């Protein structure tokens, strides 16, 4: 699991918004294997040490939004490039209210 705090700056061009900045990414990752609980052949639970990490990252986001007067839909692609645990994702959004 990763968590992120980012300061980003972006530009708007047509229906697209592009942004990037700097971030702090932190979380826990699986470390060294410790042991197994239960029967090894029948779905044993494996235990690993939990290792905390924190690093600086480069976040980026591309957002596309289209709307009518009262409702909009958006698609966002986002990611974070860093030394410990880089990630990417997609987000589909529904906007309701007075649109510009």
Image: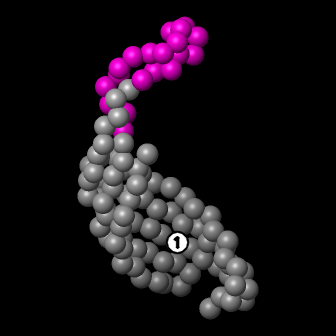
Position of 1 with respect to 65 (left or right) is left
Q: How many marks?
A: 1
- Residue 3 at x, y percent in the picture: 40, 55
- Up the image or down, 74 lies above or below 28; here it is below
Secondary element type, mark 1: strand
Residue 43 located within the stretch drawn in magenta: yes
Above/below status of 81 relative to 19 = above
Q: Nearer the viewer, residue 52 or 6?
A: 52
Q: Residue at x 57, y 62 (%)?
A: 91
Find residue 46 and report its horizontal and vertical position in percent: 46, 21
Res 68 seen here: no
Q: Residue at position x 48%, y 15% from top?
A: 37
Would residue 71 appear left or right of 16 to someone viewing this image?
Answer: right
Q: Which contiguous range is marked in magenta?
A: 29-47
Q: Position of residue 48 (x, y in %)?
A: 38, 26
Is 40 located above or below residue 86 in the figure?
Answer: above
């Amino acid at each position: 699991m990763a968590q992120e705090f980012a300061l980003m700056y972006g530009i708007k061009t047509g229906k697209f918004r592009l942004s990037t900045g700097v971030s702090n990414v932190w979380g826990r990752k699986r470390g060294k294997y410790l042991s197994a609980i239960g029967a090894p052949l029948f779905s044993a639970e494996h235990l690993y040490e939990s290792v905390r990490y924190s690093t600086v990252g480069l976040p980026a986001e591309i957002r596309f939004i289209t709307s009518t007067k009262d409702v909009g839909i958006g698609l966002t692609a986002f990611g974070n490039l860093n030394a410990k645990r880089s990630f990417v994702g997609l987000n589909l959004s529904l906007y309701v209210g007075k649109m510009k």
